Amino acid sequence: MVDDVRIVVRAGDGGGGAVSFLHLKFMSKGGPDGGDGGHGGSVYLVGNKDLNTLQHFRGSKIFRAELGGHGGGNKMHGRNGDDTDVAVPLGTVIEGVGEIVKDGERLRVARGGKGGRGNEAFKSSVNQTPRYAEPGGVGEKFELHLELKLLANVGFVGFPNAGKSTLLSVLTRATPEIANYPFTTLSPNLGVLFSKDKTSSLILADIPGLIEGAAQGKGLGHEFLKHIERCSILLFVLALDDSVLFDTDASAKEKAQSLREQLAVLKKELKEFLPDMLKKKSLVCINKCDVYDTAVKKEMKKIFPRALFISAAIHNGVEALRDKLFTI
């Protein structure tokens, strides 16, 4: 997923004013009639709800607006240059400038130069025949750093191979890559969850699995954590690692305790990345419950009495989770 790019924006220069004098049949030297130049076009970033990445910037990195036209005789005003609109996904942050969060929202990032005044504008009582005009103003040019932070209602947080992608695909029509090995998901995936009556919806974000040290940038920690920053609800997805699940020496209590440790690490990473992260609404769900024996599940319920117990693989408990996400 491309979520960090640098682009160059160049607004159009204004057109130069004209030096011209009126020519009539019986008046060879009429007054000044040089028109003003047109304004240069500006460059705008425009929010587009149909974009989810900054991938489209990989080939195009320079965006120019049109130059303003030069003024002409007979007080002819130069044509204003056309603006250039550059589409960006919602959640795009422009370093030092602003951000785009609404569909159709326009943010000017480079202003076009003003058109220069023609000599007609300089006529005065002391100078009836000015022989000069203004050049057009120079359009702004900037290098911009764009960073995408996904706009989602619910962010899935969990360790690699916790079943987050499977859960997303079951709750929504999203089709993330799914496999039974860690780090299958290497970039965030989005899906739309509809309520039972189809009257409301939530955007869900499957964030790639976190590892201890993510807040310090270990792995791709910072790249993943920033996408959780804008989510209003955190869904912690916990599941026993295979090494724990199939450890014949570990007791049911010890296996359940490993999930408490998972949650503690996840919360620690979120807090270290952004202290206010844990102030968000949150839910805990225990996934893959179809493979846990009764004793293990009993111990889990002691530790997590308010958690939702589900199995995304066999769609067990998923409807209860759906309802809870809409009422939290």
Image (tube, helix red, strand yellow):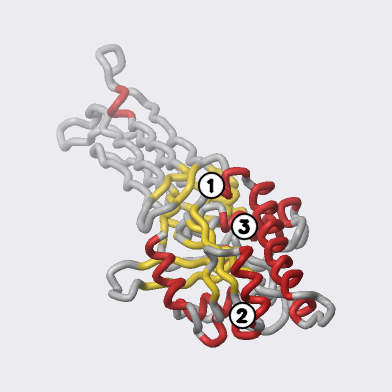
Instruction: Look at the numbered discs 2 and 3 and tell me whether their residues touch, using CB distance below 8 Å.
Output: no
Q: Can residue 155 be seen by looking at this rendering?
A: no
Mark 3 packing: few (<14 Cα in 10 Å), some, or many (20+)? some
Q: Give the residue type that dot 3 points to.
A: Asp
Total marks placed = 3
180 sits to left or right of 313: right
Label 1–label 2 contact, CB within 8 A: no
Residue pointed to by mark 3: 4
- Looking at the rendered image, the quarter that the N terminus falls into is bottom right
Which of the two labelled residues, at mark 2 and mark 3, occupies the earlier sequence position? 3
Question: Of 96 and 59, which appears nearest the observer?
Answer: 96
Q: Tag 2's secondary structure?
A: loop
Q: Residue at x 62, y 46 (%)?
A: 274
Please tell me which of labels 1 and 3 falls first in the chain: 3
Instruction: Classify 10 Å Cα crowding around label 2: few (below 14), some (14-19), many (20 and above).
Output: some
Label 1 sits on residue: 279
Q: Nearer the viewer, mark 2 or mark 3?
A: 2
Of marks 1 and 3, the one in the foreground = 1
For discs 1 and 2, the disc positioned in front in the rendered view: 2
Residue type of the residue flagged with mark 2: Lys
- Quote the CA–CA distance across marks 1 and 2: 27 Å
Residue 163 visible within the image: yes
Closest to the observer: 38 or 319?
A: 319
Q: Are marks 1 and 3 in contact (CB under 8 Å)?
A: no
Q: Amino acid at mark 1?
A: Lys
Residue 266, image x, y percentages: 67, 58
Disc 2: which residue: 288
Above or below for 270 versus 208: above
Front residue (pair 114, 182): 182
**Quadrant in which residue 165 is drawn:** bottom right
